[in-house]
Image: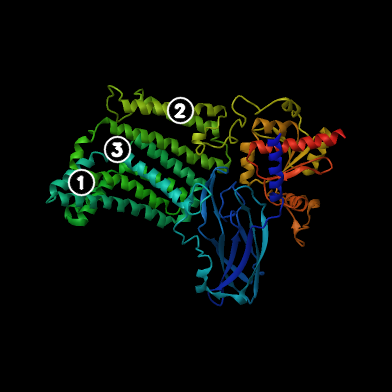
Amino acid sequence: MKRILLAVTVLIFSSTLFAQVLEPVKWSTSVEKISDQEYVLVSKATIESGWHLYSQNVPENGPIPTSFIYDDGAGAIQIIGNTSEEEGHTVDDPVFEMKIKFFENTATFKQKIEVKETVETIEGFVEFMVCDDTRCLPPTEVDLVFNLNNASAASDSASISGAKTAATSIATSVASSVTNNNAEPKKGLWTIFFVAFLSGFAALLTPCVFPMIPMTVSFFTKQSKNKAVGIKNAIIYGICIIVIYVLLGTAVTGIFGADALNALATNVWFNIIFFLLLVIFAVSFLGAFEIMLPNSWANKVDSQADRGGLVGIFFMALALAIVSFSCTGPIVGTLLVEAASKGGLAPIIGMLGFSLAIALPFALFAAFPGWLNSLPKSGGWLNTVKVVLGFLELALAFKFLSQADLVLQAHLLEREVFLAIWIAIFGALAFYLFGKIQLPHDSPLTHISVGRLGLGLIVLSFTIYMIPGLWGAPLNLISAFPPPLEYSESPYGVGYTKVGGGAMVAAHSELPDGAHLLAPHDILAFNDYDKGLAYAKEVGKPVMIDFTGWACVNCRKMEQNVWPKPEVLNILKNDVVLISLYVDDKRPLEANEVTESKLRPGKQLKYIGQKWSELQTIKYKANSQPFYVLMDHDEENLVDPVGYTPDVEAYKNWLETGLNVFSSKSDK
């Protein structure tokens, strides 16, 4: 009893924190003068600690992006190009399953214009969405006014948040969490570095590179006057390898641009191109053909290697990169494709990690030539490494095809199909490692080594682990790769029609007017306030209003992590009538429903989301989502509303408290 009272007390206290109208972003404007006709309109957002403002560039089906609209004064001004923004932070969002860019603390946006006629002020507005770790606010519009008479010289603009245009930005921060601003980019880039480093070691163990180690080290030790010179030359050789690959990563970033790479990675057609490219790489590794650069290139570079000195060593390293391209090319290409999806410095960091792994053995074995005797002899195992990499590249290729399918919503590569393909790929790899499948360049296999057997068992275990995913298992180990659970042929799991069925399933065979079933939980839900309330009166149940949003991250967390729990799901399905009101619903209202806003006189409520957002703000003095209200048929609260409540026990106690109050009222 004490635990319940304590939980209720905490909920009541926390609800007072949620029940407030929040304004975490303040906007200010200024103008920079370039010439008598050209100006830059500067919009600066000051963001409260803990909140983040989304970028102008958000992938489809993600959060609401920030957008600017400027009044051109009937042709008095001309808008030049797009509104630029700062670098911000880019994260892999686990809920939306996409890369999302946002800003914290401050954000500066700039728009270049050309004045055609004499004007003193320019008007516009910004629409934006902000979230913190527990809630999101509905899309908000703020009017902007720019006074050209107060314009400062463009050279003074450096003091305004250090804003940089998207076209000249070289580095985009890459992160995996939103908790530490400084650690985010470093963590993401370190991950890319280590993955590339391991990929470099994998490339080292291929038939094109591994035999070069003793040959090259022997060359430096024999051709040098003494051991010290040999070690020095081998180290320079390793540094040249690093320089060559890093220059490749720099060229990719410089040619395409950091932000352009990130944008391309979310483009449907480039995902399809990446898919085809990786399939070609995979087929090459499996032995169908070899991807090689022209022999003339290798001959010309090799002739330059005889010049001696630093120049000769550099061309030797370049010759290695060209000659080994048939093995390293697919790995380098895959790394650049993956790094491109991160944007910023990722391609450069990726090539640094890859080349360091390639170069390190040459320097170490030159310093300690005796270690060469411990190297395993070249043989069929090198081709085995190449084939394993081919299977992995083939599996990775379908990740890119899946991303394109998700964006198009074509439903051609749904979760079950994706998993079936992966099960087939890794199952074939397991059979290959066990010696049941032979490929063109394989040596005769008289026995299976312990290492090969161990790797085969790991791959087989992984294959078996994926099989329950066909029946709806979440597969948390690979959750970042397959499509989400709801993007499947059977959202409820293969062989099942509903999750958590029961008495309510039969009752829902004919849905009430305006109702639908919320998959995969099978919760009867309304998106219309009046219809939901009328149904609640008809069946004699309390109403639970769910102020939510399509782009609300924490709303999805509640629906995915809290609502499915049996103790909560049973209440939502059987004891309340759920009304979900989406505050960011951009569908237009019917003509007879368009009214003037009570919060912003002179502005009209044109969209469904604006209607529900204003209802929440006026009636409940709150504007964050998720926001849950339990009320009776007289539209009176049964218990204080709550916001994001990830604690299942606390959320269940809140529901039960409201139900008990409703039951007490009904008995009177």
Are discs 1 and 2 less than 8 Å apart at CB?
no
**Which residue is labeled 2 in the image?**
463
In the picture, the disc for residue 367 is: 1
Residue reaching furthest front? 2
Q: Residue furthest right?
A: 668
What amino acid is found at the position of numbered circle 2 in the picture? Thr
Tell me the CA gap for discs 3 and 1. 20 Å
Which residue type does callout 1 highlight?
Ala
Q: Dot 1, crowdedness within 10 Å: few (<14), some or many (≥20)?
A: some
Q: Which quarter of the image is occupied by the N terminus? A: top right
Q: Earlier in the sequence, mark 3 or mark 1?
A: 3
Cα separation, mark 3 vs mark 2, equals: 25 Å
Q: Earlier in the sequence, mark 1 or mark 2?
A: 1
Residue nearest the viewer, comparing 173 with 426: 173
Location of residue 250 by image quarter? bottom left
Q: Comparing marks 1 and 2, which lies closer to the viewer?
A: 1
**Which residue type carries mark 3?**
Leu
Structural distance between the alpha carbons of marks 1 and 2: 43 Å
Considering only order in the chain, which callout, 2 or 3, is on the residue closer to the N terminus?
3
> Would you call the spot at circle 2 few (<14 residues within 10 Å), some (14-19), or many (20 or more)?
many
